[in-house]
Each structure stands twice: as C-alpha cells, then as structure tokens.
Amino acid sequence: MAGETHLIRAYGDRRDDGVIQLSFTLPVPLSDKAKEAARRFCTQLGLLDVKVAAAEPAADNYTFFVVYGRADVSLDYAGIDVPEIVFRKLGFDDLNKLIEDRIARRVVVLGACTGTDTHTVGIDAILNMKGYSGDYGLERYPWFEAYNLGSQVPNEELIRKAEERKADAILVSQVVTQRVDHKLALELGFDAGFGPGTKPSDVANYIVHALLKKMGKEPEDLHFEGEPG
Ligand code: B12
C-alpha cells in the first residue's frame, strides 16, 4: 500500500540477520597477523561480528580472504521505484522468426578484436558457430550475417569493412583494457558494453531489439532479460 515501508536486510543464516560474505585480497603474506588485518579491515568497513572463514595465499606477499560479518544496514524496498518494461529474452528460433517477420532481411554484424589486442577467444565465443557454453554463436543464426575479422584489426579497417557491408552492428572486443563495463562503454560512446560471462544469445537479442527501436518498431524504453545494465 502507498506509503508503507518494506525494510529488507541481508540474509545469511536467518531472516534479517544481516550476515554477508566478502572476499578480497590484501598485499601481505598469509599469517595470523594478516587474518587480524582482514578482520580489522572489515570492521572499518562497518561490519560487526567479523569472522575470517578462509585465508589463502594468492601470490607471494598476497593473501585472499573470505570473511563473514553482520551489516547493520536495512533499506526500504518499497521506496525503490525503477520503471521498466522487461521482455523475456527470445530463444534461437523465436529470435530468428522475429527478424524474418519484423526486419525481413538478414541482420549484418561485423566483429573484431581491435588495435594490438590478440585475445580472440572472447569475440570467437560470441560470433563463431560453436558459440559459448552451449549457446550458439551469431554465425549459426540463419537471420544473421555475421563476420568475424579476428584479432589485431585496425579500427579504420573495421569501420571501412562495416561500411562496405552496410553493417547493422559492429562488435569490438577489447580484452586488454582498464576494465571497461557497460557504464564506461556508454560513456565512451558505445551503445552497450558486454563483460565476462556474456552469452551470444544476449548479444543477438540486444542487437535485434536495438535495431527494431532504431527502426521505430519497438518502444524506446523496452528492456529485455540479459540486457547489460
Ligand atoms: C588466453 C589469454 C591470452 C592469450 C590469448 C590467446 C587468444 N587467441 O585469445 C595470449 C597468450 C596471446 C595472451 C596474451 C596477452 N595477455 Co592475455 N589472457 C588470456 C587469459 C588467460 C584468458 C582470456 C580468455 O580467453 N578468456 C575466455 C573468454 C571466453 O573470456 P572473455 O575474453 O572475457 O570473453 C567473454 C566476454 O568478455 C565477452 N566478450 C569478449 N569480447 C567481447 C566482444 C563483444 C562485442 C561482446 C558483445 C562480448 C565480448 O564474451 C565472451 C564470452 O562470455 C586472460 C586471463 C583470464 N582468465 O581472463 C589473460 C589476460 C586477458 N591477458 C592479459 C594480458 C596483460 C596479456 C598480455 C599483455 C601479456 C603480455 N605481457 O604479453 C598479452 C597481450 C597480447 C596482445 N597483444 O593482446 C591480462 C589483461 C589485463 C587487463 N588489464 O586487461 C589478463 C586479464 C591476464 C591478467 N590477469 O593479467 N593472453
């Protein structure tokens, strides 16, 4: 009911106990002193009843910790208002059918790992027939025309080829980066940024919905599952 609050706290073992798990690395060799440092680190973060559950050497003079602690934080879930229209992500056949019905031509996509970057596994995972963790790559979609230009492709060459083929979407893979996420990708002028764990079907759905929006065939504020956020 309007005006009612709905307070939520983290759930560890029991409702509202506020218990959370944290993992992090400190630049010290593994020792009891290191564990105490980890405990104080979490206490300074505001956690209560801090317990160091695991401490493992991550490298020389680096220790990885798993810590539990109680966060005395609650927030009013009812006070969070995020207007969204979320559509179910379409599967392989449904998405191809949507392209056939609403775009009525193959969607042209070019992808490359650009600049001096040689990390091709990522872009291959998105584009190649075999895809990634059982999710087909865009080359397998009959209603996509997907071109994988490989690695170390100069940006100018990618743009030139994209213009030649009248590409609907250009996929740029940069793995040696300063951790580009969706937010930074938008700031850099890209339409979206996809990170580790992305499935080809996420990208395929994103491209089709973005194209339909551009063609005015879908509402601007449409969102779908798997869309980077
Ligand atoms: C394999 C690898 C290599 C291989 C690459 C072989 C190849 N053909 O790809 C080789 C040995 C060549 C290599 C070299 C180097 N590497 Co290297 N490499 C790795 C490693 C171990 C795995 C990367 C990988 O393939 N992951 C698997 C794929 C599937 O994951 P992914 O790339 O994230 O892709 C997924 C998503 O990100 C997404 N995605 C990726 N790209 C795109 C693009 C689009 C458009 C979309 C939508 C989605 C998408 O979809 C994919 C599936 O989900 C990582 C460490 C790691 N575990 O990540 C280091 C790593 C990436 N490498 C690193 C570095 C520094 C280098 C070198 C500079 C090392 C050196 N000093 O020589 C050189 C650079 C060479 C160059 N010019 O690029 C660093 C990068 C650090 C940073 N700041 O970014 C890492 C993180 C290692 C580390 N911890 O330091 N590397």
Image (spheres, rainbow, N blue to C red):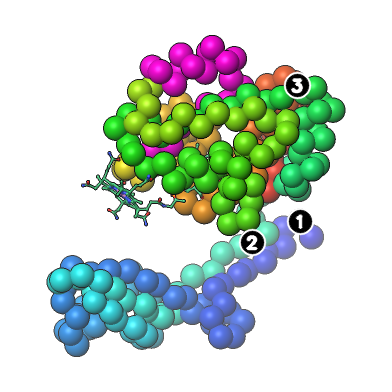
How far apart are the alpha carbons under marks 1 and 3?
48 Å
How far apart are the alpha carbons under marks 1 and 2?
12 Å
Q: Earlier along the polypeptide chain: callout 1 or callout 2? A: 1
Q: Earlier along the polypeptide chain: callout 2 or callout 3? A: 2
| Residue that mark 3 sits on | 105
For discs 2 and 3, the disc positioned in front in the rendered view: 3
Left or right: 57 in relation to 96:
left
| Residue that mark 1 sits on | 2
Q: Is residue 194 above or below residue 1?
A: above
What secondary structure is found at the residue carrying circle 3?
loop
Residue 182, image x, y percentages: 48, 41
On residue 77, which mark appears?
A: 2
Q: Is residue 167 magenta?
A: yes
Q: Residues within 10 Å of mark 1 (few under 14, many from 20)?
A: few
Q: Earlier along the polypeptide chain: callout 1 or callout 3? A: 1
What secondary structure is found at the residue carrying circle 2?
helix
- Pointer 1 and pointer 3: residues touching (CB < 8 Å)? no
The C terminus, quarter of image: top right
How far apart are the alpha carbons under marks 2 and 3?
44 Å
Q: Is residue 188 above or below residue 130?
A: above
Left or right: 104 in relation to 129:
right
Which residue sits at x=40%, y=72%?
Answer: 22
- The answer to which image quadrant residue 71 occupies is bottom left
- Residue range in magenta is 156-175
Residue 28, image x, y percentages: 16, 73
Left or right: 172 in relation to 80:
left
- Pointer 2 and pointer 3: residues touching (CB < 8 Å)? no
